[in-house]
Amino acid sequence: MTVSHDRAMTRRGTYPKGVAKREELLNTALEVIAREGYSRASLRQLAAAVELTQTGLLHHFESKEALFIEVLRRRDSAAEKLYRQALDEDPTLDFAEMLAEGVTGNTDVAGLMQLYARLAAEATEPDHPAREFFQNRRRALVAAYSEQIHGLQEADAVPTQHDPTMLALLTAALMDGLQSAWLVDPDIDMAAAMRAFWALVECRPE
């Protein structure tokens, strides 16, 4: 899910040419990282791809971490747009299947999964620049999932004994865990695991 831009970033690239170059750099970085992975996407490579020096790149993004945060924010924004469109088209959307399709689709952009996992791990340091991004991202994701789960409970599709917020938190944590595990062992069927979890959730007591 999307979160507000860091203040330090919004001060950069305010002129039209700067905004256009920043957008080009973000789009290019997203494509390169998705294809090459986190470890192989150096600042030098990303800068060269948009005909900038590393110094020129850092004019638009104050650090490597700032750039990577914005890449993840861009990825989340695209995913949120698809999610909202799907809900608008079908308010009774199968939530478990949507989650399963989401983790399956992420295997096509494994580099971005790797970036997310690596940066999330680094953000466990209290003073890491990505810490606030991941805190806000998780809270927004849990809020969105909780809203959807509450709607499913009102439609009698999910048992009401489950707390929507706690179930949303568990779902988000499962997705993160599955993706980290898949990066180490691509034989893991993330979609099957997500469906299995939600089959347990939807079981009703006798």
Image (cartoon, rainbow, N blue to C red):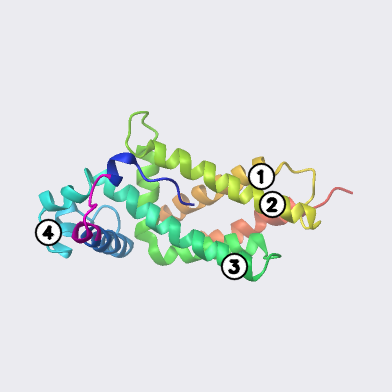
Q: Quadrant of residue 6?
A: top left
Residue 167's mark?
A: 1
Residue range of the region highlighted in magenta in the rendering? 11-19
Residue lying furthest right: 206
Q: Are marks 3 and 4 in contact (CB under 8 Å)?
A: no
- Mark 4 nearby-residue class (10 Å; few <14, some 14–19, many ≥20): some
Name the foreground residue: 19 vs 93: 19
Q: Earlier in the sequence, mark 3 or mark 4?
A: 4
Q: Which residue is mark 2?
A: 149
Side of 98 where 54 appears, left or right: left
Residue type highlighted by circle 1: Leu
Residue type highlighted by circle 2: Ile
**As drawn, 63 above or below 107:** above
Residue that appears at 81% across and 56% down: 156
Residue that appears at 56% across and 62% down: 84
Residue lying furthest bottom: 89
Label 2 or label 1, whichever lies nearer to me, is: 2
- Mark 2 nearby-residue class (10 Å; few <14, some 14–19, many ≥20): many
Q: Earlier in the sequence, mark 3 or mark 1?
A: 3
Q: Which element is circle 1 on?
A: helix
